[in-house]
Image (cartoon, grey):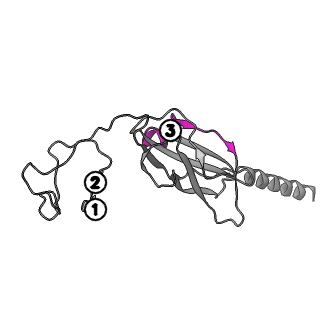
Amino acid sequence: MSRFFLVALAGITALAGAEAFAVSELKAVQLRCEYETDPLGIDTAKPRLGWVLESSARGARQTAWRVLVAATAEELARDGGALWDSGWVESPEQNQIEYGGAPLNSHQQCHWKVKVRDGDGREGGWSAPACWTMGILRGEPWRASWVAAPEGVPTSPATSPFSARVSSLKNPCAARSCMCAGSAFTRRG
């Protein structure tokens, strides 16, 4: 009988220990920066981050969060956070989380992910990665050029040589967005 009692006690202890190290199914999804998904042109030095919680467990709640922000997707995939590693922050907040890392530069791309702890203190897995790109900060000048029809060519949308056709650049440049003055222009691809 005492042998049965010891085996049962060992089994219960092992299960209790396994429960303490179990991974939570609570996970951060739908990551947002300034209320947008993967936005371009963020013009605030300390963007606000947020996420939605997902869990199949009823009544699941977040008690802490940790954010990693990296300059490259590769660094983030290695769980690097050279721009910001918030460490664990004991908080149920999941919106209006102000970026608290290294100063950001104009046009800088930031890759980030988050993980949360549930009500039992168990960590969930990392979220899917997200990113944002900074806009122009600190009054820096724009670096752009106008695209226009050659001189003497009519410029109405119906007759413009740039309307309703695909154009290829002879010297491609690094561009992430296009600012247009009319609704006749759309981005494809």
Residue under pointer 1: 183
Residue under pointer 2: 180
Q: Quadrant of the C terminus?
A: bottom left
Crowd around label 3: few <14 · some 14–19 · many ≥20 (10 Å): some
Q: Nearer the viewer, residue 121 or 159?
A: 159
The amino acid pointed to by label 3 is: Ala
Crowd around label 1: few <14 · some 14–19 · many ≥20 (10 Å): few
Q: Bounds of the magenta span?
A: 70-90
* Disc 3 element: loop
Which one is in front in this view, the residue at disc 3 or the one at disc 1?
1
Q: Is residue 189 visible?
A: no
Q: Position of residue 29 (x, y in %)?
A: 55, 57
Q: Nearer the viewer, residue 4 or 27?
A: 27
Q: Residue at x 30, y 51 (%)?
A: 179
Residue under pointer 3: 45
Q: Residue furthest right?
A: 1
Q: Residue at x 45, y 47 (%)?
A: 131
